[in-house]
Image (spheres, grey):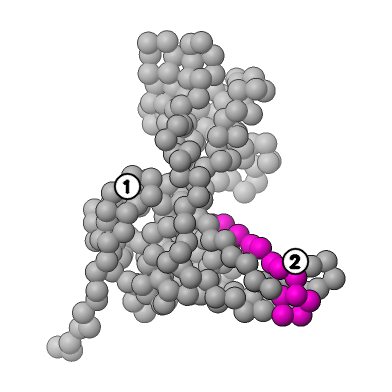
Amino acid sequence: MLPKIATPKYDMIVPSTGKSITYRPYVVKEEKILLIAMESNDNVAIENAVLDIIKACVETSINVNKLATFDVEFIFANLRSKSVGEGIKLNPTCIAKDCESTQEVKIEIDKVLVENLDTDKDRLIKLSDEISVGLKWLAMNDRLDTDKDLSNTDVVIQTIARSIETIFSGEEIFNASDSKPEELIDFVESLNSDQFTEIVAKISNQPYLSYKFEYDCIECGTKNERELKGLQDFFG
């Protein structure tokens, strides 16, 4: 029997829960899954590949499908930093109007942050004297099953419906998990404009993976200030 190469173990803190998990770097077998998905240029395939790799490499018992999107992105960023090096190379285009120069910039993955994490503490919205809703941040699989044929308005309505965790009505408490999707959509469609806008604003301000960097263009000298946001900016 051929020998097996020992793989190191690392710990990280899951942003939304503050709990520690143990993981190992991904190996060629798992990287192959990602590379095939990236060659397809299909965002859904890439996100599925990311989930599969996390499931394979995280050794702590954890339900990946229930993690918030920014948790998944943060975990994968850490996996990548330990698996293929702590830097990735991008070639951004200069922001100057008359300059289309690109140049190589190295991104230090170990300095990637989760922004807006403080918004995770207050997800209860009072809609009226009697009714309030408790929101959850969308998990990756909540994004994957969005119907591509929906109008933009329907996508927003369904996103809000999937973001509702609990509805409080007087003394009664309704768990969204006990309700049918159609019932939650009906509830969202019954909101007035102000209530709808308040929930949209809260969801839009959810935590996200971020890396801010700046560089001077080698062609025109313009100072470029950039922010990478989410998996697609880093690895898409």
Residue 218 in the image, given as x and y percentages of width and height: 72, 80
Describe the element under mark 1 as helix, strand or loop: loop
Indicate whether residue 98 is drawn in magenta.
no
Which of the 4 quarters of the picture holds residue 214?
Answer: bottom right
Q: Which residues are magenta?
A: 217-230
Count residues near mark 1 (Cα–Cα under 10 Å), then give few for <14, some for 14-19, many for 20+: few
Q: Tell whether 216 sits left or right of 207.
A: right
Give left or right: position of 87 versus 65: right
Position of residue 34 in the picture relative to residue 24 (left or right): right
Q: Amino acid at mark 2?
A: Ile
As helix, strand or loop, the secondary structure at mark 2 comes to loop
Residue for point 50% across, 64% down: 46
Q: Look at 45% across and 41% down and name the residue there.
A: 118
Q: Which mark is residue 95?
A: 2
Q: CA distance from mark 2 to mark 1?
A: 37 Å
Q: Is residue 8 above or below residue 55?
A: below
Residue 179 showing in the rendered view: no
Quick check: 86 above or below 165?
Answer: below
Q: Quadrant of the C terminus?
A: bottom right
Front residue of 109/42: it is 109
